[in-house]
Amino acid sequence: MTTSEMATVLAWHDALNAGDVDTLLSLSSDDIEIGDAHGAAQGHGALRDWAQGLGRTIEPGRIYVHDGVVVVEEKVDGSGSAASAFRVVADHVTSVFRHDDLAAALAATELTEADLTG
């Protein structure tokens, strides 16, 4: 685990929640992949469109990290929950995939409770 990967993902969440798209883009690779069960998109343009259309706050909870993969349990607008799996390379998010719940994100990334940060 590196603190850098966690810091990048937490800063990414902060920028997203603040509506600071410029910072969000600076924390993301030019060819970032964004996806969920309904499809995927790639690049800064897709990230900008997604972030500007989000219209809700995503609060990070428990964080799991292993070899550049970061899974974050998330509270959406303080009520619903989901999880996102991030790939971080050289302090830039290269991909983020939303999952319906933490179990699905952990299964997709093969992370376990042993990867939970403390």
Image: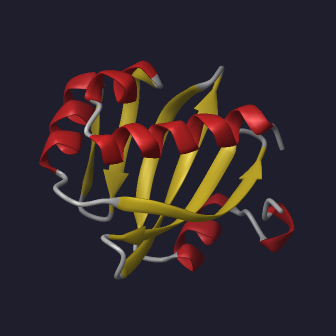
52 vs 97, left or right, is left
Which quadrant: the N terminus?
top right
State the residue in front, 10 or 110.
10
Q: Residue furthest bottom?
A: 79
Question: Residue placed at 52% from the left, 37% from the top?
Answer: 11
In the figure, 31 relative to 102: above or below?
above
Picture coordinates of residue 24, whole percent (x, y):
37, 30
Picture coordinates of residue 98, whole percent (x, y):
40, 60
Q: Quadrant of residue 41?
A: top left
32 vs 54, left or right, is right
Q: Quadrant of residue 38?
A: bottom left
30 vs 40, left or right, is right
Picture coordinates of residue 29, whole percent (x, y):
45, 21
Question: Residue placed at 38% from the left, 37% from the top?
Answer: 15
Q: Quadrant of residue 103?
A: bottom right
Question: Residue placed at 80% from the left, 73% from the top?
Answer: 113
Picture coordinates of residue 58, whole percent (x, y):
38, 60
Which quadrant: the C terminus?
bottom right
15 vs 115, left or right, is left
